[in-house]
Image: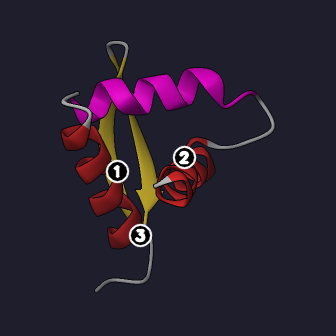
Amino acid sequence: MNTRPVKRSLTLRGHRTSVSLEDAFWTALRDIAQEKQRPINDLAAEIDETRGTDCGLASAIRLYVLDHYRKA
């Protein structure tokens, strides 16, 4: 398992961006998207829209994944 963040590409609302995430968080985000039957880009766009300006996208994704599994 890679513990260092890896840069990954996403398309959010038609705009290409990249986010650096550890393998475990990327895999968890993919699993959550699959569980919700949504494309990963759509889920990431939703997270991006709700994150506010005080949090970067990678941090917002990590917090989303953590919250998802805490509620499970």
Range of magenta residues: 39-52
Kindly identify the amino acid type of the residue bearing the numbered disc 1.
Leu
**Residue identifier under label 1:** 29
What crowding class fits label 3: few (fewer than 14 Cα within 10 Å), some (14-19), or many (20 or more)?
Answer: some
Residue at the image position 54 percent from the left and 46 percent from the top: 64
Residue at the image position 37 percent from the left and 13 percent from the top: 13
Asked if the residue under mark 1 is in contact with the one under mark 2, i.e. CB atoms within 8 Å, the reply is yes
Left or right: 57 in relation to 46: right
Q: Quadrant of the N terminus?
A: bottom left
Q: Residue furthest front?
A: 72
37 or 20: nearer the eye? 37
In this rendering, the label closer to the viewer, 2 or 3: 2
What crowding class fits label 2: few (fewer than 14 Cα within 10 Å), some (14-19), or many (20 or more)?
Answer: some
Residue 22 — which label?
Answer: 3
- Label 2, label 1: how far apart the Cα atoms are: 9 Å
Asked if the residue under mark 3 is in contact with the one under mark 2, i.e. CB atoms within 8 Å, the reply is no
State whether the magenta stretch is mostly helix, strand or loop.
Answer: helix
Residue at the image position 23 percent from the left and 27 percent from the top: 38
Kindly identify the amino acid type of the residue bearing the numbered disc 2.
Tyr
> Residue 47 placed where, x, y %?
52, 31
- Label 2, label 3: how far apart the Cα atoms are: 14 Å
- Label 1, label 3: how far apart the Cα atoms are: 11 Å
User: N-terminal of the two: label 2 or label 1?
Assistant: 1
7 or 52: nearer the eye? 52
Kindly identify the amino acid type of the residue bearing the numbered disc 3.
Glu
User: N-terminal of the two: label 1 or label 3?
Assistant: 3
Asked if the stretch drawn in magenta spans residue 43, the answer is yes
Residue 62 higher or lower than 23, as above or below? above
